[in-house]
């Protein structure tokens, strides 16, 4: 089953002379295990498309399915619940809570998802998986930019989402740190079958993608598949 399906998605902002067509009939299917980049010039519709995939925005017309479920009839709380349980987000500005420790920041994702079990233990395991298990008690101000982004990755992954959405995840990192964080996500894709979709201008991210979707003027200009989706972890995830 596809993770996400967009069918003839159109998104219009404003009206009359101020009307802007952010998306002009986009169709897109994301399969489990993909490591996909959505790229294109500024104003091409990347962020709008990512927001619609992540249920942060609704289209003007067209159909959005998440794991086979049509989201059109979802109310605000239902959309929030689906996001909390099934989608992880990684932002370019990290979006960590400054007064919380690394572990507590990761735990917030479990609280929002209504997850059961030992949240503290799960957060520590997630932080260890991204290489900063020894920094669980540090607050964001005590971490480097790369360490903060690793906390954000752990927060996105701790609830074992169907999909991780990363919006310009390397934009606020130097090239060496960005490369290290990107390799971490690629390893998780290859070894665990975690599905990622990125919005980026960064050639380094684009070069590592398995699939590159290029938007221009709100439409899909090209869709290049370089490698098949990772199959790692699919059986394990289906059995949960």
Image: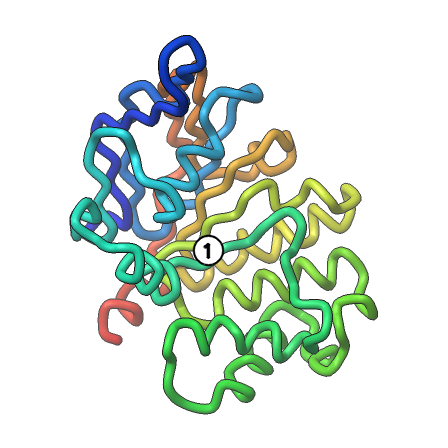
Q: Quadrant of residue 152?
A: bottom right
Q: Quadrant of residue 87?
A: bottom left
**Horizontal side, residue 1 vs residue 60: left or right:** left
The residue wearing badge 1 is 190
Crowding at label 1, few (<14), some or many (≥20) Cα neighbours within 10 Å?
A: some
* The C terminus - image quarter: bottom left
Outermost residue on the top side: it is 17
Report the colour scheme: rainbow
- Please state which of residues 196 and 114 is positioned toward the viewer in this rendering: 114
Counting the numbered discs, the total is: 1
Classify 230 as above or below 224: below
Residue 46: image location, x then y, percent: 47, 30
Q: Residue at x 17, y 52 (%)?
A: 69
Residue 110: image location, x then y, percent: 45, 76
**Horizontal side, residue 26 vs residue 56: left or right:** left
Q: Quadrant of residue 115?
A: bottom left
Outermost residue on the front side: it is 16
**Horizontal side, residue 200 vs residue 24: left or right:** right
Residue 103: image location, x then y, percent: 63, 79
Q: Residue at x 40, y 22 (%)?
A: 14
**Horizontal side, residue 106 vs residue 144: left or right:** left
Q: Residue at x 42, y 41 (%)?
A: 51
**Element marked by disc 1:** helix
Outermost residue on the bottom side: it is 118
Q: Residue at x 63, y 30 (%)?
A: 203
Residue 21: image location, x then y, percent: 38, 18
């Amino acid at each position: 089953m596809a993770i996400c399906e967009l069918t003839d998605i159109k998104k219009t902002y404003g009206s009359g002379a101020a009307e802007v067509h952010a998306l002009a009939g986009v169709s897109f299917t994301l399969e489990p295990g993909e490591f996909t980049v959505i790229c294109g010039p500024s104003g091409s519709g990347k962020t709008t498309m990512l927001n619609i995939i992540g249920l942060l925005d609704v289209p003007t017309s067209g159909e959005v399915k998440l794991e086979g479920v049509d989201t059109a009839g979802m109310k605000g709380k239902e959309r929030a619940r689906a996001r909390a349980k099934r989608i992880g987000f990684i932002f370019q500005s990290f979006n960590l809570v400054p007064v919380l420790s690394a572990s507590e920041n990761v735990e917030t994702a479990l609280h929002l998802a209504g997850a059961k079990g030992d949240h503290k233990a799960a957060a520590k395991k997630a932080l260890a998986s991204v290489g900063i298990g020894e920094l669980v008690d540090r607050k964001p101000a005590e971490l480097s930019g790369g360490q903060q982004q690793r906390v954000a990755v752990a927060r996105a992954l701790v609830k074992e989402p169907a999909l991780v959405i990363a919006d310009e995840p390397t934009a606020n990192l130097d090239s060496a740190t960005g490369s290290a964080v990107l390799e971490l996500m690629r390893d998780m894709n290859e070894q665990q079958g975690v599905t990622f979709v990125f919005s980026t201008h960064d050639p380094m991210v684009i070069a590592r993608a398995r699939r590159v979707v290029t938007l221009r003027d709100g439409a899909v200009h090209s869709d290049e598949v370089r490698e098949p989706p990772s199959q790692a972890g699919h059986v394990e995830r289906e059995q949960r």
